Image: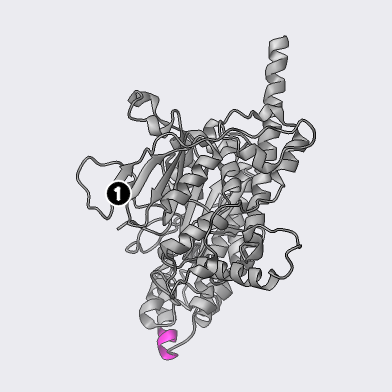
C-alpha cells in the first residue's frame, strides 16, 4: 500500500521494470491531447478577468502583454465556482468515514483552489515551462500510482484531476522536456532542472521523546514540536540564506512541509540542496544513538539563535508537557547525556531517595548539586554545554533530510486531503505558528456540510453577492492566505523578469 504521510514511499519514487501488485502499480498515463476550447477574446478596454486569462487553453497568452497593474487586478479577482452540473453537497453522506470518492469529487469540483495552485507552480499568469514541464503524480482511489503526468494549461490540469478523482497527488520537479515525452527523448535530454527546496518535519521522528502520544496520534502537547521546528527553520532560511517566499503546509495528520519557492532555491542542484540540509541538520542518529547532538564550540550563530528560540519552550514543552525523565528507566537517558560521572552518581542517589519526581525537579537538581560541589572534577563550562546539547536534542527540529537533498523528490500538494484523517493540507502562517491547531483544520465532510448550511441559510436572499464555495466554509482563511502568498511570489518574479529584460536590452544596445 502507498505510504500516505509526508512524501511518497521511496520505493514508488523510481520506476521499476519488475511486476507489481495491482494495489500499488506505478503507471504512466497519457490520456491523449487535452480537450481545448477557443480562447475568449480579451477585452480591448479594461482589465481582463482571471477567468479570461486562465481559460485560454491554447497556452499562447504571453506574460508581456499585461502590465503590472493588470496582473495585480487579475490575480486579485475572486475564483467563483463555474456553472457546471455538480451534485449538491447534501446528496452525499460520509456515513462517519473520513473521506469517500464522492466527497473527494465534490471537493475538487467546488473547493480546491486550482487557479492559485497553477500560479504557484507556474509563477506567471500564462503557462510557462515551470508548469508545462512539471511532473504531477496521482494516487488513485484504488491505490494505483500514476507518475510523470504534466499539463499544458491550468484548465487541462483541473479537468484531469476532476476526471481521475485521486485520493491525493504529489508535485515533482520541472524537467528539461515534457514528462509525458520522456520515453521518446534522449535519456540525457530528460533531467530535472528545478523544484522548490522542500523540508519535511514528521512527528514520528519524535516518538522516542514524546510521552503524550505515539505513532499516528497527535495532540496539542506534542504538536509543539512542529510549532518550534517551524520557528527555528523559518528564521534560519530567511536570515541565513535570504529566502523570502517560504510556504509551510500541514501534512494532514502529524507533520508539516516547507516549500521554499524563491527562484534561487528552485534552481539549486542536488549538491547545493545537500549542503543546505546538512547545514540545518543538528540532531543526527537513530533510536539506538545515545547522544544525537555533537557540536564544536564556540557555537555557530545558527545554533546560538536556535537555542534562544528553544529556551522559551523547553520548560513547558519538554519538562512539563512531556515529563520525559520521571520514571527511573527514563532518567538514565538524561544521565547518559551529562559529562561528570561523580555528579551523575550523586544525582542517581538523590532521585532514588525521592522517587517519582517530575522532570522539572530532576533538571533543577543538576545545577543544585553542581553548585554544592559534590564533584571535585566537575567542569562547570562542560556541564553548561552538555545541558545546551540536551535542549537541542529534545527540541531542535528533526529533519527527514533525504526529502530535501534531491531535485526529483515528490511531495504532497497543498490542499490535498489526508485519507487517514479527512483533513485538508492547509497552509500554516509561519509568522504565528503557535496559533495553528491541527485539530481545528477542517475535514472534507465538514466543509461540504458548511456549504449545505450556508446555502440553506442564504437561499431566501438570492440577490446577495455570489460567493465562491470556499468562502462559505472554514477553508476561506487558508485559501486567502495561500492566494496572498502566491500573489507576492508572482510580483517578485515579475520584478526580476523586468530587471533581466532591462539588463539584456542594455547589453544589446551596447
Measuring 43% from the left and 75% from the top, which residue is drawn there?
95
Main SS of residues in magenta: helix
Q: Nearer the viewer, residue 321 or 130?
A: 130
Of 463 and 376, nearer the camera is 463
| Furthest-left residue in this view | 19
Q: Which residue is mark 1?
A: 11
Quarter assignment of residue 475: bottom right
Q: Position of residue 455 (x, y in %)?
A: 64, 68
For label 1, count other residues whose C-alpha is less than 10 Å away and answer few (under 14), some (14-19) or many (20+): few
Residue at disc 1, secondary structure: helix
Which is nearer the eye, 428 or 121? 121
Q: Is residue 43 left or right of residue 94?
A: right
Q: Is residue 320 above or below residue 55?
A: below
Q: Does 45 sit left or right of 507 as displayed?
A: right
Q: Nearer the viewer, residue 360 or 243?
A: 243
Q: Position of residue 363 (x, y in %)?
A: 51, 77
Q: Which residue of the protein is positioned furthest toward the top in this rendering?
A: 510
Please tell me whether residue 502 is drawn above or below residue 283 in the rendered image: above
Question: Does the magenta portion include 415?
Answer: no
Quarter that holds the C terminus: top right
User: Looking at the rendering, in which quadrant would you find the N terminus?
Assistant: bottom left
- On the question of residue 94 being in view, the answer is yes
Which residues make up the magenta segment?
Answer: 349-354
Residue drawn at x 70%, y 69% is 458
The quadrant holding residue 492 is: top right
Q: Residue at 42%, 65% (x, y): give it.
A: 100
Is 394 rendered above or below residue 375? above
Instruction: Name above or below for residue 318 compared with residue 74.
Output: below
Figure colour scheme: one colour
Amino acid at each position: 500500500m502507498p505510504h500516505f504521510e509526508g512524501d511518497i514511499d521511496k520505493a514508488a519514487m523510481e520506476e521499476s521494470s519488475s511486476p507489481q501488485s495491482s494495489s500499488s502499480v506505478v503507471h504512466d498515463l497519457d490520456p491523449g491531447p487535452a480537450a481545448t476550447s477557443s480562447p475568449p477574446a480579451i477585452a480591448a478596454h479594461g482589465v481582463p478577468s482571471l477567468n479570461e486569462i486562465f481559460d485560454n487553453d491554447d497556452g499562447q497568452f504571453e506574460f508581456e502583454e499585461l502590465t503590472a497593474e493588470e496582473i495585480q487586478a487579475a490575480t486579485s479577482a475572486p475564483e467563483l465556482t463555474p456553472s457546471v452540473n455538480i451534485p449538491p453537497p447534501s446528496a452525499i453522506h460520509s456515513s462517519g468515514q473520513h473521506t469517500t470518492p464522492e466527497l473527494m469529487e465534490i471537493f475538487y469540483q467546488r473547493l480546491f483552489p486550482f487557479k492559485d495552485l497553477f500560479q504557484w507552480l507556474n509563477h506567471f499568469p500564462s503557462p510557462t515551462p515551470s508548469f508545462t514541464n512539471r511532473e504531477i503524480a496521482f494516487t488513485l482511489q484504488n491505490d494505483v500510482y500514476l507518475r510523470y503526468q504534466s499539463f499544458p494549461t491550468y484548465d487541462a490540469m483541473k479537468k484531469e484531476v476532476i476526471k481521475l478523482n485521486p485520493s491525493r497527488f504529489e508535485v515533482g520537479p520541472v524537467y528539461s522536456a515534457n514528462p509525458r515525452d520522456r520515453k521518446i527523448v534522449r535519456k540525457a535530454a530528460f533531467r530535472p532542472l528545478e523544484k522548490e527546496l522542500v523540508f519535511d518535519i514528521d512527528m514520528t521522528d519524535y516518538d522516542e521523546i514524546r510521552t503524550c502520544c505515539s505513532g499516528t496520534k497527535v495532540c496539542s502537547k506534542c504538536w509543539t514540536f512542529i510549532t518550534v521546528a517551524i520557528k527555528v527553520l523559518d528564521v534560519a532560511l530567511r536570515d541565513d540564506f535570504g529566502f523570502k517566499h517560504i510556504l509551510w503546509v500541514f501534512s494532514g495528520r502529524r507533520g508539516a512541509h516547507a516549500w521554499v519557492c524563491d527562484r534561487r532555491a528552485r534552481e539549486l542542484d542536488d549538491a547545493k540542496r545537500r549542503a543546505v540540509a546538512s547545514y540545518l541538520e543538528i540532531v543526527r542518529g537513530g533510536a539506538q544513538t545515545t547522544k544525537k547532538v555533537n557540536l564544536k564550540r564556540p557555537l555557530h550563530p545558527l545554533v546560538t539563535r536556535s537555542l534562544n528560540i528553544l529556551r522559551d519552550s523547553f520548560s513547558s514543552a519538554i519538562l512539563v508537557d512531556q515529563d520525559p525523565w520521571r520514571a527511573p528507566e527514563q532518567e538514565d537517558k538524561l544521565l547518559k547525556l551529562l559529562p561528570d560521572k561523580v555528579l551523575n552518581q550523586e544525582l542517581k542517589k538523590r532521585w532514588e531517595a525521592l522517587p517519582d519526581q517530575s522532570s522539572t525537579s530532576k533538571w533543577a537538581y543538576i545545577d543544585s548539586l553542581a553548585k554544592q560541589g559534590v564533584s571535585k572534577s566537575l567542569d562547570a563550562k562542560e556541564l553548561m554545554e552538555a545541558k545546551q546539547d540536551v535542549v537541542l536534542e529534545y527540541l531542535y527540529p528533526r529533519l527527514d533530510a533525504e526529502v530535501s537533498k534531491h531535485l526529483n523528490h515528490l511531495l504532497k500538494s497543498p490542499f490535498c486531503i489526508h485519507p487517514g484523517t479527512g483533513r485538508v493540507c492547509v497552509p500554516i502562517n509561519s509568522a504565528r505558528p503557535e496559533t495553528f491547531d491541527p485539530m481545528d483544520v477542517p475535514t472534507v465532510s465538514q466543509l461540504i456540510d458548511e456549504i449545505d448550511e450556508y446555502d440553506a441559510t442564504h437561499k431566501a436572499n438570492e440577490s446577495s453577492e455570489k460567493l465562491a464555495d470556499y468562502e462559505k466554509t472554514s477553508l476561506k482563511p487558508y485559501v486567502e492566505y495561500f492566494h496572498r502568498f502566491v500573489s507576492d511570489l508572482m510580483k517578485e518574479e515579475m520584478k526580476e523578469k523586468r530587471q533581466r529584460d532591462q539588463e539584456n536590452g542594455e547589453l544589446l544596445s551596447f
